[in-house]
Amino acid sequence: MNPLEGRSVALGVSGSIACYKAVDLASKLVQLGARVDVMMTEAAMEFVAPLTFAAVTHRPVVESLFDPKSEISIDHVAIAERADAVVIAPATAQTIAKLALGLADDPIGATVLATAAPVIVCPAMDAHMYDNPATQMNVETLASRGFVIAGPAEGRLASGLMGKGRLIETAEMVGHLRLALGRRGSLAGRKVVVSAGGTKEDIDPVRFIGNRSTGKMGYAVAEAAIDLGAETVIVAAPNALQPPVGARVEAVRSALEMRDAVLAESSDADAVVMAAAVADWRPRERSASKLKKGGRSSFSLDLERTPDIIAEVERRGLVKVGFAAESDDVLANARKKIAPKGLDLIAANDVTAPGSGFGSDTNRVTLIDRGGNVEELGVMTKYEVGRRILDRVASLLGCPAARRDAQPPAR
Ligand SMILES: Cc1cc2nc3c(=O)[nH]c(=O)nc-3n(C[C@H](O)[C@H](O)[C@H](O)COP(=O)(O)O)c2cc1C
């Protein structure tokens, strides 16, 4: 399951030194399954040859409104009508100004005027050009019309100066695109809370009890939730992952902190997916200073139970999904957890099996519902597992199927 499979993206490239980064973006979009139509301004073609984009997208590049090798010279709004989203990256000061005025003297302007799809503008320019009141006013005009203004970032600019004007990173551009495309997904208007990562239970200021969870499964569920249009909150135990664009992250450390955050966030949620690896036990006392070895040859920690977070989440109409990471009797052990925790669905996985478990990009999960129905998912990416779980959540919530073919809402 490729997140952008079947999606059509129009990519407008204007004449910035950051044009080379748009090649990476085009390539990434193709890898994610999108059909990408690249439109270049004359200035953009001074920086990168159209052939480069044609080679990564396997499609002709539109070089002008009257480009005989492009369908646009016969039907000048063809790309506008086909596009599920339009991305302008990099967007120069000039192109932003033209879009704000509604000019249509090039393929980008004509496409943006004619499309009903969301438009994402990724500015890239010198910091002074960006700060200039003319540019600022144009950016505000586009934002007020519902365009997504993604960036620019602060950092080192091509001029050698530090400032605000850098094109945002490819992953972030893709994230903004997915967020915009998700707006019409099956979970649009719903709130999904996902817990992720492994909690840490402090022993003293330098030591803790942790586990091997990396957070990949929870973040993949969050990514899928964004793609399906949900308002997405990640209650995240410490991890090294980049959250998907559009997700709100509530950072926590211990099981108790995670409980407080999950209960607070779930009060107005439609679904809670507990993908975090939460400690079962925590030290009864945390030492304020580093514990010394002393002359001891052994040492015992007095542990107490942590709360069962998902069991404490009130059902009141929301869908509760738990994960059972097991190393033996996977299905039997998972099944036993459904009733006491009040779950609608449990995702059971054998963390010792090949292709599943902590740190892996894939997982092999079996879904069991309240009625005891079993759906065995083969080895698949954690993102796909997330999609499958959320498809089940959407159907339990009675959500209509994704409205991809319906008229999109006004930008
Ligand atoms: C080396 C070089 C780098 C440039 N980089 C940028 C840039 O990053 N952002 C920008 O807005 N303009 C930049 N420009 C100026 C634009 O190329 C120029 O305004 C052009 O008319 C933009 O046209 P377009 O928006 O139709 O592509 C650069 C020009 C040169 C010569």
Image (cartoon, helix red, strand yellow):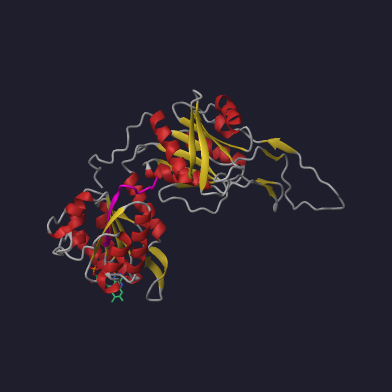
Above or below, 115 against 395 in this view is below
Name which quarter of the figure residue 130 lies in: bottom left
Nearer to me, 202 or 86: 86
Above or below, 66 against 346 in this view is below
Q: Residue at x 35, y 32 (%)?
A: 399
Q: How many marks?
A: 0
Looking at the picture, how far across and down is residue 82, in whole percent? Answer: 22, 50
Q: What residue range appears in magenta?
A: 1-12
Name, please, the residue furthest toward the right: 295
Q: Is residue 5 magenta?
A: yes
Residue 81 visible in the current orientation: yes
Q: Quadrant of ligand 1?
A: bottom left
Residue 341 visible in the current orientation: no
Which of the image's four quarters has the N terminus? top left
Q: Is residue 256 magenta?
A: no
Name, please, the residue furthest toward the top: 371
Nearer to me, 341 or 258: 341
Name which quarter of the figure residue 53 lies in: bottom left
Looking at the picture, how far across and down is residue 324, in whole percent? Answer: 57, 35
Name, please, the residue furthest toward the bottom: 160
Relative to 292, is 408 on the left or the right? Answer: left
Q: Residue at x 30, y 47 (%)?
A: 6
Looking at the picture, how far across and down is residue 146, in whole percent? Answer: 27, 50
Looking at the picture, how far across and down is residue 301, in whole percent? Answer: 76, 42
Relative to 173, is 12 on the left or the right? Answer: left
